[in-house]
Image: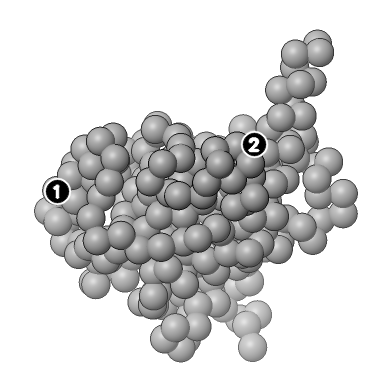
Amino acid sequence: MLLVLFVLYFIADSARKTTLTMQRGANALRELPFPVGDGFVAAYQRADAWATERGYHRREIVHFSLVSEEDLVRVHGHADPDDTPWWVKSAFWWHPERRCVYSITEVQGRVFHDFDTAFGREPGRPEYELTTSNHPDGAVVPRPPRFPAQVFPGKGANELEALHEQATRWIEKRTGLGPLEPGDTLAHVRRHLRLQAEHTLAHPLWHLRFYIWHLSKGRRLNRPVWELYEGRIPAPGRRG
């Protein structure tokens, strides 16, 4: 019992620190000209081959940390992204016809896939952003209705892309909005992190709720957006 409580405390405390770092738009985000790290290079090469075959074009490779710079220095004596395991590597591709961003992200040696589409009336001003991912932690904390997400652990890029296209059509019909080009990738990542953190922090006793959110995340996995967000995303007739 004590071991379970310790694990829950560690998870919740880590998530709390991560959220506070996300609120600042992550830590020392930077663009890289090429993939680094043996594990990420192999994953990147596979993803790039798949993306190119599917009509995506490479955009950027970025490096950022969800651990505060103070903690990085305290634990490792420095905050250099090339020498610590707490830095996240991501690569992004863009599909001009589908108006969809495909990305892979390496988190402590594991690689996850995401598909993201922004919706709106004006270029560069998204009103909604849809994410389809196979990262289980993507379903831990609640997300703003403007940033709906569906998470399918274990699914590969082909399956995730098909699920994302189905959800994209549902968002379009539900909101009456079309897909937008996302704009600058680094700004896109920072905005996602910051808004997610602000939504989490808006919940009363948010730091205590991490225990409940972690224990209940299974209810949000392997469910499409029309189940998760029915009634939370307005139909076209209700928009101003």
Residue receiving disc 2? 217
> Where is residue 54, by image quadrant?
bottom left
As displayed, is residue 46 above or below residue 52?
above
Q: Is residue 21 visible?
A: yes
Residue in the image at 87% along x and 49% along y:
205
Category of crowding for the residue at label 1, using alpha-carbon neighbours closer than 10 angstroms: few (below 14), some (14–19), many (at least 20): few
Q: Is residue 174 visible?
A: no
Closer-to-camera residue (173/208): 208
Q: Quadrant of the C terminus?
A: bottom right
Closer-to-camera residue (185/73): 73
As displayed, is residue 45 above or below residue 60?
above
Residue type at mark 1?
Ala
Mark toward the viewer: 1 or 2: 1
Cα distance between the residues tagged 1 and 2:
33 Å
Q: Earlier in the sequence, mark 1 or mark 2?
A: 1
Q: Is residue 178 left or right of residue 11?
A: left
Residue in the image at 70% along x and 63% along y:
198
Task: Give residue 65's position: percent from left, percent from top.
Answer: 51, 51
Residue receiving disc 1? 49
As displayed, is residue 191 above or below residue 37?
below
Task: Give residue 226's position: percent from left, percent from top.
Answer: 55, 54
Element marked by disc 2 = helix
Indicate the colouring scheme: one colour
